[in-house]
Amino acid sequence: MTDIRAADHPVPRAAPDQAAARRIGVRSRRTTRRGRRTGTAARPSLTLWQRIKRDKVMLALMLPGFLYFAVFSYAPLFGYLAAFEDYQPYTGFLHSTWLGLQNFTDLLADDAFWTALTNTFVISLIQLVLFFPAPIGLALLLNSVASAKIRKFVQSVVYLPHFIGWVVIVSIFQEVLGPTGAVQHMMSSVGLPRFDFMSNPGFFPWLVAIQAIWKDCGWGTIIFLAALLSIDPGLYEAAAVDGAGRRRRFRSVTLPGIMPVVILLLILRLGTILSVGFEQILLQRDTVGAKAGEVLDTYVYYHGVATQQWGTAAAAGLIKAVVGLVLVLGANKVAHRFGQEGIYSRGDR
Amino acid sequence: MATVEIDAKRTLTGRPPWMERPSRFGRGGKILGIVLISVVVVYPFLAVVATSLSSESDIAASGGLVILPSHPTFDAYRYVFSGGIVSRALWISFAVTVAGTALSMAATIGMAYGLSRRGVVGGRFFLATALFTMLFTPGVIPMFLTVQKLGLYNTLASLVVPSLVSAFNLVVLRSFFMNLPAELLDAARIDGLGDWRTLTRVVLPLSKAVLAVVALFYAVSYWNAFFNALLYLNDTSKWPLALVLRGLVIGGEATSAANEGVVPQQAVQMAVVVVSVVPIAAVYPFLQRYFTKGVLTGAVKG
């Protein structure tokens, strides 16, 4: 990205071409050679203050966003101090009693914490088995539809639930699966016994997966459809000419074509295994009871904000955050090893 | 004769010449699958609308499952808009969504623009600050304590400020800005435009599509948000629509209309669901064709 400055700026960021360089003189041509674009340090003649003055508009534009991240992403990390204290909101961090690791040992002795941890893993596992492959299947189905009109129509239908909030989704499920819903009517009309989908604790992990699929399966196809579209049609044609049938083409062209994306997303999913639809589960925790409906996130919420046990809740949150960070970093490392970008890449491209 | 015609047409609509005709079984399965999926997605919406239009007798006659109300009535909607708690929540949600989206867009555009240009002083530091937040979330307890410390607790600002910038949207915008043709930005500079006017006259007009998608993402998240409200508001008169809906449907709170026996409770619940979905459904068709671009730009992190 090049940049020619008006006369009030001492030196341009980099000169674009001969004509422009002539306009602003020889000095700037030297900048081109030593421009910051190539990674060398700024011209020694340009002090930090001069650079700040030059970029004042840019800095002012970036300031609100930067302040937001500083105040709401970084500063709150100090709140985890509460995990080591008998934190009381009115005494504050500095004056609350220091407990060391007391909160953590309390936490590990709490059966409810272990229940929450187990539920988190069970729900995550079921999501991985049911929810992860669903968009791949749907993308393959959509991709095989020859008519573009039908494909577009189905796409617009299945993307819509993604934009609907969890409160509405749970309400809709209550309407359809609840005691007066269509599914119950259908079941009793074929002689099946009543089954309370919405409040049966044993069914809850499955319910969570079904809701997640209904909401986000369609949206999840976007990335797989793009992968399918990026497969060179020439490969299919060549395979067909060589006598490969439908199945053989699927196995030898389609699968290798989407595998990198599938593996990448699977790895990243494993990195977030401790996070299972917080809002979704929070909304339904009371209906199914804490035994089935408590996950790590809801445990933190109920113990902290609702029942004021700040210390233990913060300790649980901290454990989750640290394990989560390690998992995400590990997942990215594995993704990089597979030659993928992961959610972050090294350095600024 | 007729078969030949149909075949020619079908090849024209997209099947390449080398591909075999699908077997009758495969075609049938595919059609069935697509119809089934569409029904599973669409039916619940229809059921919700039907119930919201039902009268007490419809609901009683059908055992709760209304497919087509025989006495359609707008009573539930009349009640929802009549100025009670639901109408107030509707206004709050609307105001929070509009103000929040505007503020979020301003902050995100500014930061994305600054980060999209090379050589800006401190650029790498700002970029690292923003990207690193994608790796962790501050967690409920620290966020709550921060909001409390800042005096935002129990204010409507707490619905906007703590979720002002999404790192994901920031990355989407930044990569789009970075991919704008460099020649145009050069031309703007040669013509003497500063950073600010380059943004407003060149960059933003060229980015309308992606701006629309990012604005939609923000608006939808403000409109749907209930957890921030649950966490930061203790005054029920400030509740947004999603939280009121939660009380009505999931918490089973009775509406005053149901108490008076005027409008069936179930119809009111579903009317609120409809009111929550309609604004999203209304803007959705216009933005739909940009989704793929938005999602994929975000996937290629930069």
Image (cartoon, helix red, strand yellow):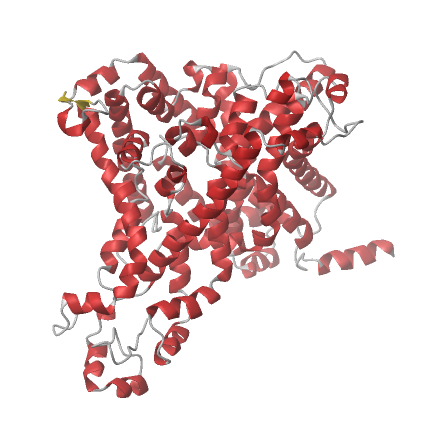
- Check the image and report above or below for B17 versus A173: below
The percent position of residue B250, horizontal first and vertical second, equals: 53, 22
The quarter in which the N terminus of chain A is drawn is bottom left
Q: In this rendering, does residue B88 appear at all?
A: yes
Q: Residue at x 38, y 29 (%)?
A: B231
Q: In this rendering, does residue B180 appear at all?
A: no
- Check the image and report above or below for B63 versus B159: above
Name the side, left or right, on which B101 lies relative to A315.
Answer: right
Name the side, left or right, on which B68 lies relative to A63.
Answer: right
Q: Residue at x 40, y 26 (%)?
A: B234
Q: Nearer the viewer, residue A247 or A326?
A: A326
The percent position of residue B298, horizontal first and vertical second, equals: 42, 52
Name the side, left or right, on which A317 lies relative to A284.
Answer: left
- Check the image and report above or below for A248 versus A231: above
Name the side, left or right, on which A76 lies relative to B37.
Answer: left
Q: Residue at x 23, y 36 (%)?
A: A77
The quarter in which the C terminus of chain A is drawn is bottom left
Q: Nearer the viewer, residue B250 or A155?
A: B250
